[in-house]
Structures are given as structure tokens and as C-alpha cells.
Amino acid sequence: RRHLPGAQARVVLTLLLCAVAAGCNVAVLWAGTGGHHAKSSHVRVLLLHLAGADLLVALVVMPLDAAWNITVQWRAGDLACRLFMFLKLLAMYASSFVTVVISLDRQAAILRPLAITEARRRNQLMLYTAWLLSTGLSVPQLFLFHTVTISSQQNFTQCTTHGSFPRRWHETAYNMFSFTGLFLLPLLIMVTCYSRILLEISHRMGPGILSAKELPLRRSRNPIPRARLRMLCLSVAIVSSFLVCWTPYYLLGLWYWFWPAAMEGTVSRSVSHLLFLFGLLNACLDPITYGLFTLPWRRGLGCCCGGDMLEVQSQPPSLATSSFRCSASSFRTRWGAPGLTPSLETPAAPSPQHPGTSTKESSCL
């Protein structure tokens, strides 16, 4: 148990992140579903789906990681092994895909502001597709993961993909497929959407965006520039948070998949622990960024402390990035505990999301 001190610290930090992420996302769900809204806006629906996906991450991925590092080996049986690995990847995919849906919705709201009547039906279709894809892409986990027992090590049992791939490159290909779906593809879509959004905002605002003296005057006469600037800030925060939190861990995962021997002698297990925890932090940033950029703090605090339910009018909420990721891994009997190398847990990528349309600033939010 040479990794025990690091694992103990990881358990504490993971449980702390779990409490924060679960509490914040429950508050978002409570605020978004409370009150007397006859019909939720399409933006509210998107944010509720995102909060639900993030909550699934907080209630499945984080506790699983903490418990696994406490027990070191797998003690829940083969059925639980398959089911939890399925739920883990489902949560990862759902968080990433719902974030992509929000990015696409924000792009449509900016580039096609007059098509607002189509937004609800379009978003419902994209949400159904996101959840169905998340479920379908997670199904292989039910067949790849299983329990393996080493009798020579006092019946040491682990939940792993050991023996499921005939060749090592098969496992690498599966990991790369998961990496593409959880991180690379959502990242490319996010960057494309927000780049087009920023270009459109810059085009509509013209040279006035560079004038600090002109901005207050334009804001006082027209709320749209202010909304566009808020969208600019939120977009930068979302993309930056996603990149900062998850890129280091994904790069470490790529290094391990293609050059495992080189990484073993260069990167310590504590670094792998730290990068994974740093990626988990992204789940907590969703509701926090959502509150910072779209809601007055008094409203948010009132909601969390039992005040009036959140009334989204001209500034619908928005969550920023979320998620981490998980993928199949090889059987690491040498280390035992899960997640000590990037092959055992691969972060899932979250991503941005934004406010929705409004009666007052629908062309920008």
C-alpha cells in the first residue's frame, strides 16, 4: 500500500468536491424547478438537464472514486462492477453532450435570433439525442468491465477490463474513441460555436467595442451591447475553465496510452492524483459560473437559503463547463487502487453552456 497516503488525501478532497458539486447542482435544480412557472423556457430546460448530468457525476463518479481508493480492491461484486462502470461513463458523456447542446443553442440564438420559436422543439430533439447517445456509447462498459481475482495475492479482486481486449492496440483504440467523444469532439464544437458567436458580436457592435467611453452610453440606450459583453465574458470563462481543468489530465492520458513505459518512470502517482482532482473541480465550476455571470448574488443566495424561487426573466441562468471522464483501463495489479494511472480513469469533458433567450435581450442571450 505504498500509495496509501496519497490515496487518503485523494479521498478527502474527492468527498469535499462531491459535497460542493452535489450541493450546488441540487440548488440549481431546486431553483429551476421551483416557483410557479407555467411553462419553463427552453433555456431553463437545458440548464436543468445540465445540472442533472452534473449531479449524476457528483453522485456516481466522485463517491465511486473515493470508495475505491478506500477499499483498494473491488468488493461489490461483478454485477456492481459492470453497472457502476456503465453509470460512470454515462454521467461523463451526458455532461459533455448536454454542454454541447447548450453551445449549439447559444450559437443559434446569436446567429439566428429571429428563429426563437423553433428553439424549444430543436433543443428537445438535441437533448433526446444527447441522452440516447450517452446511453448507447456507455453500453460497452457492461461487457468490457468485469471482476478479476488473483488468488496468489490473498484473493485480491479488481474491477477491470483485463482480458477484454485481444490486443493492446484494441484497448488504446477504445480509449481514444472515448477521449474523442468525451473531450476532443465537444471541445471542437465548443470552440467553433463560441468563435462564431464572438465574431458575430464583434461584427454587430462594430468599432464601438474598442471605445471605453462609448460603451456606457450605448449600454444606457440599448441593453443589447451589455448582453453581448456578458456573453463574451461568459464564453471566455467557460472555455478557459474547461481547458484549464481537463487538458493536463487528458494529455497525461494520451502519454500513458502511447508511451506507458516512459511515463511510468517520469510521472509519479501523486501527479496523476492531483490532475484528476483538478479535473473534477470543473464539475463544481458549473453552478458557480452560472451564478456569477447570470444571476445577482442576492437572488442566488436567497434561493439556496430558502428564499423565493429563482424567477428567470430577462437573464436566464447558465452553467459553465462540467465534467470529467472515464474510460476503460487495463488491469493494474501492481498498484491495485483505481485511478492511479490515466488508464484507469479518463476525465470526461465538460463544456460550456449559456443563458437562454429573453424577452428583453433575446438577440444576445
Image (cartoon, rainbow, N blue to C red):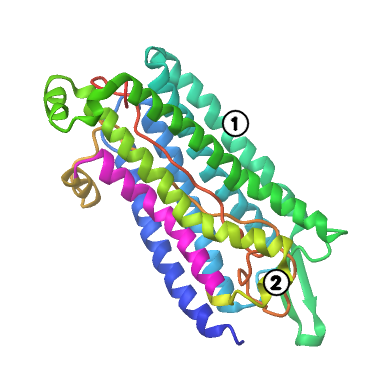
| Image point (22%, 24%), residue name | 208
Q: Which mark is residue 129?
A: 1
Find out whether residue 54 is within the magenta segment: no
| Image point (49%, 70%), residue name | 274
**Magenta region:** 271-296
Reading the chain from its start, which is encountered first: label 1 or label 2? 1
Identify the residue under disc 2: 262
Predominant SS along the magenta part: helix
Up the image or down, 189 lies above or below 330; here it is above
Residue density around tag 1, few if under 14, some if 14–19, many if 20 or more, within 10 Å: some
- Give the mark count: 2
Is residue 344 shown left or right of residue 234?
right
Residue 256: tell me if it is visible.
yes
Res. 169 image quadrant: bottom right
Secondary structure at badge 2 equals helix
- Type of the residue with mark 1: Thr
Q: Position of residue 250 (x, y in %)?
A: 58, 57
| Image point (58%, 37%), residue name | 131
Residue density around tag 2, few if under 14, some if 14–19, many if 20 or more, within 10 Å: few
Q: Position of residue 292 (x, y in %)?
A: 26, 46
